[in-house]
Image: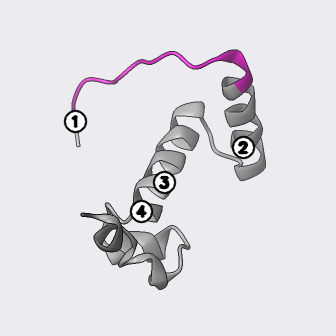
Amino acid sequence: MEGKGTTFWLPNDLASLIDKVKKDRRDPSRADTVRFLLLWALANLSYLPTDTKKALGLPNDLSSRREESTP
């Protein structure tokens, strides 16, 4: 997937926390950590397919969460 990168601002305390997660996960870059966290959150909210949830280590019982909360 090619395209333009996206730049955004983070408060210093959040950037420091992401750097701690980066170190703990041994990610090569902050961008890799942010991508993982974003994918994990989207999968947790049931916006991503079940196979992606599995790959991220999320339980399968999250699959109906979004459907149940939709009016």
Number of the front mark, 2 or 4: 4
Question: Mark 4 and mark 3 in contact (Cβ < 8 Å)?
Answer: yes
Q: Residue at (53%, 41%) from the top-left corner?
A: 32
Question: Mark 2 and mark 1 in contact (Cβ < 8 Å)?
Answer: no
Q: Where is mark 3, residue-wise?
A: 41
Q: Where is mark 1, residue-wise?
A: 2
Which numbered disc, 2 or 4, marks the residue that appears first in the sequence?
2
Which numbered disc, 1 or 2, marks the residue that appears first in the sequence?
1
Label 3 crowd bin: few (<14), some (14–19), many (20+), radius 10 Å: some
Q: Is residue 10 magenta?
A: yes
The prevailing secondary structure element of the residues shown in magenta is: loop
Magenta region: 2-13
Where residue 65 sits: x, y (%)? 40, 72
Where residue 29 sits: x, y (%)? 59, 34
Which numbered disc, 1 or 3, marks the residue that appears first in the sequence?
1
As shown in the figure, which amino acid type bears the numbered disc 4? Ala
**Regarding mark 3 in the picture, which secondary structure is present there?**
helix
Q: Is residue 12 above or below residue 41?
A: above
As shown in the figure, which amino acid type bears the numbered disc 1? Glu
Q: Is residue 40 above or below residue 66?
A: above
